[in-house]
Amino acid sequence: MRHRPFFRWVLTLGVLVFGWSAYLYSTASSAIQQVDLTVISEKHDGQCTVRWKDPYHGGGRLRESAYHCDPDRDAILKAPGYDPDTGYGWDTGFIFTEGPHKGDLEPSQLDRTDPYALSDALVLIGLALIAVGLVGGNIRGSVRLAGARPKTVARARKLHEAADQVVRDHAQACDAVRVAWEALRREQIEARLRAVPVARLIKRAAVSRAVQNVEAAGVRTARDVLEAGVLGLAHMGADRRSAERIHAAARRRADNIEAPLTVRVDPVHSGPCTVALLVALHVLHEAGAGAHRTAGAGAALATELERALTDAEPASGYRSMLGVSREQREIARSAVSTLQSLMAGAERDGLPAQFAQTSVDLLRVPDDPHSGVSARADFESSTGQYYRLLAQVVDQQDTLTGH
């Protein structure tokens, strides 16, 4: 149900009515002037003929017009009591001081609406409407703003950022281990393939000539065969069918090597790939076993906070709370309660401090060129822990990718 600004329209109407009253008062007070009227003749119902002096035309010439005199005025003001010599009476009226009717007699108050009385009535109506609009709007606004909790939502967002950050930092550290492990694994596979001569791949007489031709062209090992490909072998003197057989044999040998291969980390005779793996593992090892648990807790908390923050978005500001429907406000209030519960639980378990410390530990990427030396030394003293950590990271990747 969409919010309807009823009291806002009431307030607007009150301001307009009040402005109308002010306009009538200003026009009434500035556009007319009171003058004395000489009543030449008068009937019992007040219909009379009057004479007045027009100061705007002819230097104050006298003018006459029909007029509705006040029949209830004192008898001494009526003819002939007011002036026995002439038999005239007396009354007052108003003449226009501006516009095309300047100098003309304004209709009697008995024949028109008194602008001052109308202005006064409109003032009262306008003030009443303004009061209703302000009071009702404030009451309604207070009810609508009852669930707004900007500070609570802001704190929950900061906690969500910290939880999400530790998850991303841990994922980044694990990715560095996987990349280095895959590079070392590929290095060892290729080393074994380079140890397999082409002549040992296939011993059929039908392809012996082709094997001799590719060996003469520089293809000596199974690794060279895989790099050359079928088309490369064909260009080196092997017919198409023989090239396919040689390449398929090299592919089978690579699969046979790769499937049972256990990557060996040799800290003594270590190449760049081994050093990179040890350095990446060293970061996780230094962060401690609790880093994995902290990242898991961060992932779970971030998921719950994100869902509650989405529902609590209207409660993040007073203006946004005013602009939503009643159902959305109820959802936001419930979500704020959920956020408060989640933050209380996180504070009780000390998670904010754990998130911050773990992120710092995981971001300690060593820039020291001798970091490989310290990583190798740490590996030799904690070999079992390193292998368990490597297995945990690699198995996690295999579970994610379905390997």
Image (tube, grey):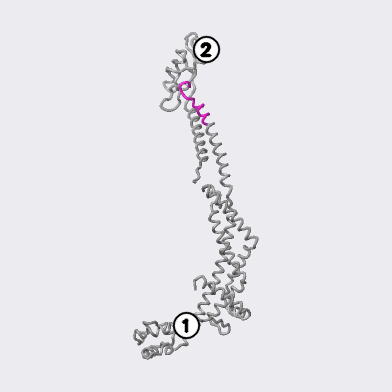
The image shows residue 52 at horizontal and vertical percentages of 45, 18
Q: Using the image as rendered, state which of residue 236 and residue 77 is in the foreground.
A: 236
Above or below, 212 against 113 in this view is below
Above or below, 1 against 363 in this view is above
Above or below, 75 against 343 in this view is above
Secondary structure at badge 2 equals helix
Q: Which residue is mark 1?
A: 256
- Mark 2: which amino acid? Ala
The residues colored magenta run 109-122
Q: Which residue is mark 2?
A: 75
**Going 50% across and 45% down the picture, which residue do you hit?**
3
**Going 58% across and 84% down the picture, which residue do you hit?**
268
**Going 49% across and 9% down the picture, which residue do you hit?**
80
Q: Using the image as rendered, state which of residue 189 and residue 102 is in the foreground.
A: 189
Q: Tell whether position 120 is magenta.
A: yes
Query: In the image, 237: left or right of 317?
Result: left
The image shows residue 82 at horizontal and vertical percentages of 51, 11
Q: Residues within 10 Å of mark 2 (few under 14, many from 20)?
A: few
Q: Tell whether position 333 is magenta.
A: no
Residue 311, disc = none
- Mark 1: which amino acid? Asn
Secondary structure at badge 1 equals helix
Q: Using the image as rendered, state which of residue 59 and residue 4 is in the foreground.
A: 4
Judged by depth in the image, the label closer to the viewer, 1 or 2, is: 1
Query: In the image, 208: left or right of 108?
Result: left
Earlier residue among tags 1 and 2: 2
Residue lying furthest top in this view? 85
